[in-house]
Image (tube, rainbow, N blue to C red):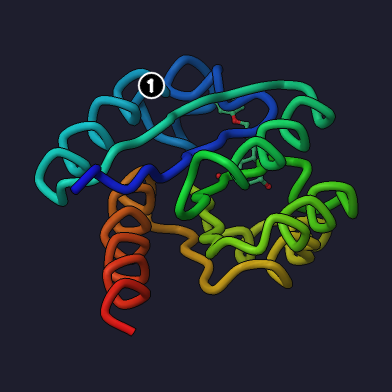
């Protein structure tokens, strides 16, 4: 049987990961995160499509594409988390399991980061566990997909 594909999407400025503000986001780069996810995916026997964009519309279009190609979406929407009804609508429209990931604990930070529009579309949210949140999300998404198959 073909490996299920899990989309892992990253929002604005995450291309700066590991290069600036290490006190908040750590020293791991986004390329390193992709490597960690690829290794975890290999172990879990799933495929991944790992992407980053600084453009909200592009993220919306990528979410739409998932209808045809993916079994689940892991997303770190970065600052769009706190602003984007467009992202929420897109995630609700594709009707796939969604896990929201944040590297930092958004609830320990500024009040404007405590609100997530995206969470309403998510089966679960992982925040504050650093980049390990991505591999934990992959494990959880694999379990969700496996459970769908046995139902
Ligand atoms: O903690 C997270 O993962 C965030 O989604 C990261 C966003 C922030 O706006 C959210 O509130 C929480 C920021 C991503 C920008 O990442 C940078 C990394 C290094 C240097 C500069 C920005």
Q: Position of residue 40 (x, y in %)?
A: 18, 43
Q: Quadrant of ligand 1?
A: top right
Q: Position of residue 90 (x, y in %)?
A: 79, 50
Indicate the quadrant containing the C terminus: top left, top right, bottom left or bottom right: bottom left
**Left or right: where does residue 103 sit relative to residue 76?**
left
The foreground one among 45 and 110 is: 45
Does the Cβ of the disc 1 residue fall within 8 Å of ligand 1?
no
Residue at image point 33% right, 30% down: 33
**Left or right: where does residue 102 sit relative to residue 18?**
right
Q: Which residue, as the protein is rendered here, is positioned at the far bottom?
A: 151
Q: Position of residue 141 (x, y in %)?
A: 37, 62
The residue where tag 1 is placed is: 29
Q: Which type of secondary structure does the marked residue at label 1 adopt?
A: loop
Locate residue 117: give its quadrant. bottom right
Asked if residue 36 is positioned above or below residue 140 in the image, the reply reads above
Asked if residue 146 is positioned above or below residue 38 in the image, the reply reads below
The foreground one among 64 and 28 is: 64
Residue at image point 49% right, 50% down: 74
Mark 1 surroundings: few (<14), some (14-19) or many (≥20) residues within 10 A: some
**Left or right: where does residue 128 sit relative to residue 85?**
left
């Amino acid at each position: 049987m073909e490996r299920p594909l899990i989309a892992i999407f990253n929002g604005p400025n995450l291309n700066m990961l590991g290069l600036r503000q290490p006190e908040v986001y750590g020293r791991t780069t986004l390329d390193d995160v992709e490597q960690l996810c690829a290794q975890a995916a290999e172990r879990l026997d799933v495929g991944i499509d790992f992407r980053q964009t600084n453009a909200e519309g592009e993220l919306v279009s990528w979410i739409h594409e998932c209808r045809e190609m993916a079994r689940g979406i892991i997303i770190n929407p970065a600052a769009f988390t706190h602003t984007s009804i467009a992202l929420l609508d897109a995630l609700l429209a594709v009707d796939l399991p969604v896990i929201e990931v944040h590297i930092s604990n958004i609830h320990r930070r500024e009040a404007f980061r405590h609100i997530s529009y995206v969470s309403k579309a998510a089966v679960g949210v992982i925040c504050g566990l650093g980049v390990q949140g991505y591999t934990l999300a992959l494990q959880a998404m694999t379990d969700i997909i496996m459970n769908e198959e046995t139902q």
